[in-house]
Amino acid sequence: MTQESQQTSDAEVVAAVLRGDKELFGEIVKRYQGRLVNFLYRLLYDQAEAHDLAQEVFFKTFQALDRYDPQYKFSTWLFRVGQNAAIDRLRKRRLKLVSLDRPSRDQDSDSAWEFPTPERGPYGELRNRERGDAISEAIRSLPWEYRELIVMRHYGELSYAEIAEVKKLPLGTVKNKLFRARQILKESLADFMAD
Amino acid sequence: MPKRQPKRHADYLELVYLEIDGELSQRETRELNEHASSCLECRAIRRKMLFLNSVLDEIKIEAHPDFSRRVVENLPPAAWEMRRPSSWRVAAIAFLGLFGAAYALTFQSESLGEALPWIGTLAAMAELFRSAALAGAGLLAASWSGVGLALGEILSRSTMGIVAFGVFVLGIDCLFLRYLWRLSRREALATSRQSHPRGRSK
């Protein structure tokens, strides 16, 4: 399926949901859940929180579905809502950190998501895990403006034009920032790049 | 037609980055391949970038298998669902249907009653419905007539009464104009939101 026809389909699905077929919203969720959860996870670094927030983002878009303009891509709208929600969540997290009597995340978390614990594997898997940790850490230590863009590109799977639309930046700026972000990642992961 | 400038080494490096994002045209890919075949540095960077791209994909996570089901099951009510035209259409059709049935049963019941005996019961119910509607209309007419009489009494008594009534009417007009102004403002806001539906800007 081409991106263009996928876009048309999104608009058609939204129109059908607005006509009253609420269950069809599940189709939209299935289409974007992987990309949105990954995008939020790479900003929040908490799997359960990323799922909670992705759910919230889908709820918000559902409630504002009548304001969606089909001449724009649904993905850019969804990721803009997701990006704002992640920024809000990180801001709240920072506020909690400065609060003296804050409860720990384990105590106040009411997340209902349960994930299987990854099993320890043979040496090869351990090595992959080490590399995975290093990549995660490299992304995490990127300056926010680069991190956001690299996460949108790789985990949100947005094109340059979509990122430019979400971030309201010129296309050239998006390209330059992604270029710079990759340079930093390349340097941070130099040990693994020699493989 | 201006002659195209030949690409510099730095331009090809930029193409390497565009390539890993799948943003290269066929012509650009061909150009990059030609250049990379003779440029050791571009080849090395291209290999590293492709590798970086693949390792970034390695750490992707899967969405919870129940995710979409849970989202759909817990969807909150949306304001647009209440405004959907189908809800008032159903009500209007039901009302018209009932009204039509009541009318037919009331005025055609004699001829129908002979053919179908149970029609009589339905006709009685329809008569009840019609009487209730007529009683309601009568009450409404009576109350309007009462308001008219009271107004006539007030206006005929003194000039102050007429002035007070004028002020009252003006007040009502002002409230109505204010309502219309708010309505048009809300519509203008909704239109501007539709043109830029992407939530808040950063």
Image (spheres, coloured by chain):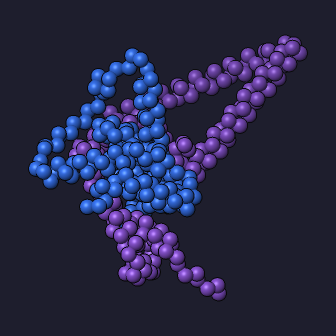
Chain colours: A blue, B purple
For the view shown, which residue lies furthest in the right direction? B159
Asked if residue B188 lies left or right of residue B113, the reply is right
Residue A189 seen in this snapshot: yes
Q: Quadrant of the C terminus of chain A?
A: bottom left
Q: Is residue A60 above or below residue B154?
A: below
| x and y, in percent, of residue A46 in the image | 32, 38
Frontmost residue, B112 versus B95:
B95
Q: Closer to the camera, A61 or A34?
A: A34
| Camera-nearest residue between A188 and B78 | A188
Residue at image x 84%, y 12%? B157
Look at 29% across and 22% down and name the residue there: A107
- Tell me which residue sits at (34%, 20%) in the image: A103
Q: Quadrant of residue B176?
A: top right
- For the residue pair A70 and A166, the one nearer the viewer reads as A166
Q: Residue A91: x percent and y percent?
A: 46, 32
Q: Residue at x 37, y 39 (%)?
A: A44
Side of A148 where B65 appears, left or right: left
Q: Is residue B4 above or below residue A24?
A: below
Placement of the N terminus of chain A among the 4 image quadrants: bottom left
Residue B144 percent location from the top left of the image? 66, 24
Q: In the rendered image of this protein, does residue B155 appear above or below residue A92?
A: above
